[in-house]
Amino acid sequence: MKLKTTTLMTITLVIICIGNLMGQEKLVNSIQKENITVNPNYDDEIGAITTQPKIQQAFLVIKKLEQQNQKELIMLTEIPAPPFKEEQRALKFFEMLKAASADSVWIDTAGNVIALRRGHSTNRTIALAAHLDTVFPEGTDVTVKAHGDTLFAPGIGDDTRGLMVVLTVLRAIKAASIETDANILFIGTVGEEGLGDLRGVKHLFSKAGPRIDAWIAVDGRSISRILHKGIGSHRYRITYRGPGGHSWAAFGLANPHHALGSAIQYFVKAADVFTAKGKRTSYNVGRFGGGTSVNSIPFESWMEVDMRSQSPDRLNEIDAILQKAVQRALAEQNRMRRHGPKLTVDVDKVGNRPSGEYDPESPLVQRAIAATRFFNTEPELGTGSTDSNIPISLGIPAITIGRGGIDGGIHSITEWWMNRDGHLASQRALLILVAEAGLAIDSTGTK
């Protein structure tokens, strides 16, 4: 029996989805779970908040918004937001936050979109944020394709869906007339991915940024995970340079490609030994290039290197291993040259994400744990590299929570997202946010 093309396509997509899910599950299972200390006082606090009529109304609003959210998720995904070029998506998100009746909305000098909902007390400010940018370069086709209940497009999950969670929480708070003690900022950040180096959130926590006393980022899928540790990273662009020339006529000149190849070999061999034990540390040569033709000695050869660790000391140690390998390869190639000038090397640090840990027994983490348990989900504390790295490193209460639904193919052109109980992520985010901001008491004496 012959299957129709559409049937074959459906089967293929199902296989892709299942494969991605299995791969993600394997990754999650490979991460050692932390022992979680549960303070019952926060279970009681969350339970009391959820009995409030306005909170129950907000939960209903979130469910009713799901169909509208699906349409807007598609619209927002189809506005490209490549690295360092998030402006068009930022403008649209600005319009959406403004239409949601925030007290004020603005775009700061870094490009972050910020909406303020004032609280009854101006002593504290809580932020709920997701990032505007994607990893995909300019020109990537971001048209959303629907196959059944699954949406396919680069960036549709990471982190466009996160932006929709932030927007949905604002809409629900407004619709249910929820008032909080603390001010709340709803934020779309720039520069979270790749060489953006968290530039948006770094600006927010600089002297030029607004006051932020606690930070909740929406990034990642699962509503069970609560990231309270930041994985630090160092990223370098390393460039060897020489005069270049004809492969025959100028043979004997120092060759940048040869130096780069040796540097990679020396680094990888030493880094492999270093990372085999101790606190988890990783390394990766992600990109390299240079040269003009097969019969030309290149005048330039470059690579981009990423190194990560949960430990600042370990990160600095593997950084030193890289530096030593780069200089060893440079000296070796210059000794091998038969004529001409020496090679030079530029070592440019293009990324520096600090690591750190926020106390799992602190109120913000405990509230996130209690809110997760309210939705009959077993919480998992974890480590990641997100916008939360910056406030965590500064000692400011910060966590990263999931955007909900089911997704896969993250950072690939086959990325997909499926709205499987996606509303739970927005309800959970609202619950954590309101608990941290404090429910205000109105003139009747009720919350």
Image (cartoon, helix red, strand yellow):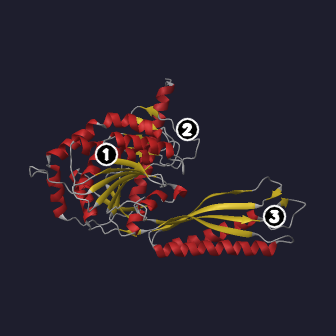
**Percent x, y for residue 120?**
21, 55
The residue closer to the viewer here, 202 or 143, is 202
Q: Which residue is mark 1?
A: 102
**Percent x, y for residue 428?**
27, 50
The residue closer to the viewer here, 387 or 220, is 387
Residue 48 falls in which quadrant of the image? bottom left
Q: Nearer the viewer, mark 2 or mark 1?
A: 1
Q: Which residue is mark 2?
A: 141
Q: Residue at x 78, y 65 (%)?
A: 242
Bin the neighbour count of mark 1 within 10 Å (Cα to Cα): few under 14, some 14-19, many 20 and up.
many
In contact (CB < 8 Å): disc 3 and disc 2: no
Bin the neighbour count of mark 3 within 10 Å (Cα to Cα): few under 14, some 14-19, many 20 and up.
some
Callout 1 secondary element: loop
* Three-letter amino acid code of the residue under disc 1: Ala
Q: Where 423 falls versus 210 (above or below)?
A: above
Q: Nearer the viewer, mark 3 or mark 1?
A: 1
Q: Is residue 277 visible?
A: no
Alpha carbon of mark 3 to alpha carbon of mark 1: how far?
58 Å
Q: Which residue is mark 3?
A: 243
**Percent x, y for residue 266?**
65, 71
Alpha carbon of mark 2 to alpha carbon of mark 1: how far?
32 Å
Q: Where 301 falls versus 88 (above or below)?
A: below
* Three-letter amino acid code of the residue under disc 3: Pro
Task: Give the mark nearer the N terminus: 3 vs 2.
Answer: 2
Q: Is residue 432 visible?
A: yes
